[in-house]
Image: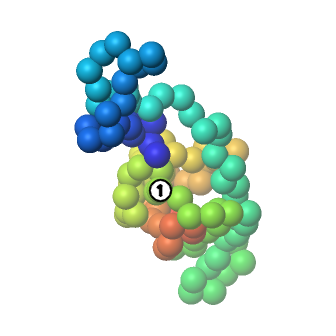
Amino acid sequence: PIPGRFSVAVRPDNNLRNFPPACEPNAPTSPLLSGTFGPSNIAITELRVKDPLDLNDFYSKDDTVIITFSQDTDYAGRGAGPWSKAVVDQVFNFSTPLGLDYYGAWDSRSMFTITI
């Protein structure tokens, strides 16, 4: 169930009423589910770089940064991509800048690749 979307209702044919019975049967509907199930337990399990053309041993154009997660994700609610630098920067916080321009896309629900 998703908070803000999920509700429950009593089926009308079940004759639910108060006790002791003083009113006609009712089929009430709940408000939408509220609250949370706690923080996600998703984790980054691997962070690696790759030079797909294997041209050099330093960080350069067309190199990739691959982020692997411990379980499938919902793409941070933004779809599989490709994502512009601005969207990548909205989702991820890097300890040092990656460069002036890059983009990213989900290779699977648990692997995100950023291309420089």
Residue 29 as seen in the image, left or right of residue 36: left
Residue in view at x 64 percent, y 37 percent: 38
- Asked if residue 65 shows in the view, the reply is no
Looking at the image, which residue is at 62% across and 79% down? 51
Which image quarter: residue 113?
Answer: bottom right
Decide: few, some or many residues near mark 1? Use Cα within 10 Å; few <14, some 14-19, many ≥20. Answer: few
List the single residue furthest toward the bottom: 54
Residue 75: where, in percent of width, then height? Answer: 46, 57
Nearest the viewer among 5 and 31 is: 31
Residue for point 41% across, 49% down? 77
Vertical position of residue 35 compared to residue 84: above or below: above
- Three-letter amino acid code at the position of disc 1: Asp
- Work out whether 8 lies above or below 80: above
Q: Is residue 50 above or below residue 28?
A: below
Where residue 16 sits: x, y (%)?
Answer: 36, 30
Residue located beneath label 1 in the image = 74
SS at mark 1? loop
Report x, y in % for residue 90.
48, 42
Horizontal arrangement in the rendering, residue 85 relative to residue 50 (left or right)? left
Residue 7, quarter of picture: top left
Question: Where does the image place residue 102, in percent across and percent down from the top left?
Answer: 47, 59
